[in-house]
Image (cartoon, helix red, strand yellow):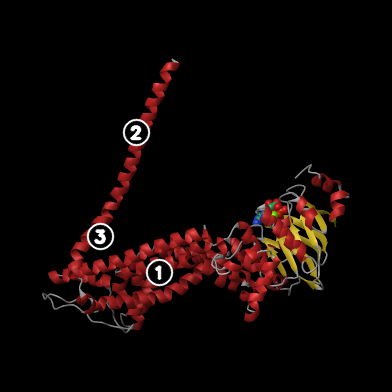
Amino acid sequence: MSELRPPTRLKSVALRKAKSAAFTGLLWLTGAIAMVPLVLIIGYVLIKGTPVMSGAFFTQTAPPPGMPGGGMAQAFMGTGLIVGIGTLFSVPLGVLTAVYLSEYGRGRLATVVRFVAEILLSTPSIVAGAFIWAVVVTTMHSFSAIAGSIALTVLMWPIITRATEETLRLVPNDLREAALALGVPRWKMVLRIVIPTAGSGILTAVMLAVARGFGETAPILLTSLGNDFINTNPLQPTDAVPLRIYNYAQSAFTQWQSLAWGGAVSLLAAVLVLSIGARILSDRQQRRLG
Amino acid sequence: MSDGLDIVGLSAWYGTDRVLADVQMEIRPGQVTAIIGPSGCGKSTLLRCLNRMHEELPNARATGSVMFGDWDLYAPDSDPTDVRLHIGMVFQRPNPFPTMTVFENVVAGLKLRGHYDRVNLKERAEQAMRQAGVWDELKDRLNKPGGRLSGGQQQRLCIARALAVEPQVLLMDEPASALDPISTQLVEDTIVQLKNEVTIVIVTHNMQQAARISDRTAFMLRESAERPAALIEIDDTRQMFTKPIDKRTEAYITGRFG
Ligand SMILES: Nc1ncnc2c1ncn2[C@@H]1O[C@H](COP(=O)(O)OP(=O)(O)O)[C@@H](O)[C@H]1O
Ligand SMILES: [Mg+2]
């Protein structure tokens, strides 16, 4: 009996190795399958969109229907304006809320604030748009870039709040204690020690929120409306890249459809750059604190 | 010379768990007082009550008095940040600020409080680093990040940071328990040299260390989790380690429990 053992064991080791290899292979395959849609989307958008991307695409407005050339400069300007003002609103608000929640909030108010942020985070963006339309657009009697910025703030604020609170909580408590024990007041400890230590994590949060802001269509449609011409007045109706894609994609003119694809490439590039940048920053942050 | 501390009727809680009850204890000026006792007996809690750091933990509170000269640190109008300006602290785990350089770490207390003389900053940093025994090692690395040092260097950097603001009392919670023998030696040297200038209270689980560096030793004990900890005995260190009065002290020192 005992002489039979070694070959049996060898066989079972071989079997186990084979099983393990098969399983690893399966996992690789699943991973690869998950990548397929991403690669397909990026590839397809690039093929359809890049031919139209020239200097004119970024500097000119729409060509007359049926004519070649032109671009969507007014949409790029508008997106910059709307998202820029929205970022200006939502970053201080979001960071302050996160600081409150992480450094001060222990009572019922903190629970309520956290709950509100949670709800807003999962609110459909068109609902936020409709709300701002009712509150801001109707009282100002005009669609405007600023109304769009406010709608985006409703969507970006909870993203920044949630992600910033998470990074603030990653800052080791030892550092807070070290500062307090030096006789530093709490607010100064937060400002000079906690926030700088969380630094790139907060930047990551902002980048994720901005990426979201770039792509929003429905709330902008209800608040900024769109505009065929370049507008730099925040109180006037303003165009945005996703709006323009939405409009041109439905049009009957092939040139307009191409421009829509070009817009899609621009959005995709911006979002990819922001997400990858955010990823790199947060990895670096984790290594620094880890 | 600095004032000592007179602890009168000090009690401390975590939530409903009363860890200290009516502690009375005198910390003499210009001396090193060691606090020893088994793990969990309230040494850190007592220490953190002395600069009002205890109350920074969630649900933690303390009552009673700690007299610093004629200042009751627990008086209603006594501001905890003022207390900590005079009574510094070194923690068990080194905690340099990772976003700051070595130099910035040392002068962090001075800068963050806003009262400092730019010209003097360098001198003060050098003096504090010499006192903490890190000047020679780190003088060429003043602009390197503070978090990239060895554990022992980090801890001595933290001691320099606490000393740079010239506290009158320095509280140290097992400052060498995570350090290598050489760093431990340097920390002990620092403590011995600081004596007479700064009043030092050090918590240590290392009885040889208490015997080597302290003038007086306090022994604490929490006999059951249901009851608060008590100060069993405080006396001259030599007396404590040779002829303790309480038999529980003797049992602990001779290694029969804890
Ligand atoms: N943050 C805390 N929350 C609740 N209980 C605590 C906390 N810190 C310490 N304790 C309790 O208080 C008692 C004393 O702890 P501590 O002062 O840290 O003791 P030591 O420093 O002597 O080891 C222990 O029983 C411990 O369980
Ligand atoms: Mg302790």
Foreground residue, B233 or B12?
A: B233
Badge 3 density bin: few <14, some 14–19, many ≥20, Cα 10 Å: some
Q: Chain of mark 1?
A: A
Element on which disc 2 rests: helix
Find residue A146 and report its horizontal and vertical position in percent.
Answer: 35, 79
Residue drawn at x 14%, y 71% as measured from the top left: A255
* Rendered image: mark on residue B34: none
Residue type at mark 2 is Ala
User: Can residue A202 be seen from the camera position used here?
Assistant: yes
Q: If the picture is divided into quarters, which one holds ligand 1?
A: bottom right
Judge: label 2 CB < 8 Å from ligand 1.
no
Determine whether, in the image, residue A38 is placed left or right of residue B32. Answer: left
In primary-sequence order, the first of circles 3 and 2 is 2
Task: Give the residue number, with chain letter if any, for mark 2.
Answer: A18
Q: Determine whether B142 is above or below B182 in the image.
A: below
Task: Please indicate whether residue A217 sits to the left or right of residue A247 in the image.
Answer: right
Task: Give me the residue at 34% from left, 33% from top.
Answer: A18
Q: Nearer the viewer, mark 3 or mark 2?
A: 2
Chain for numbered disc 2: A
Q: Split into 4 quadrants, where in the image is the N terminus of chain A?
A: top left
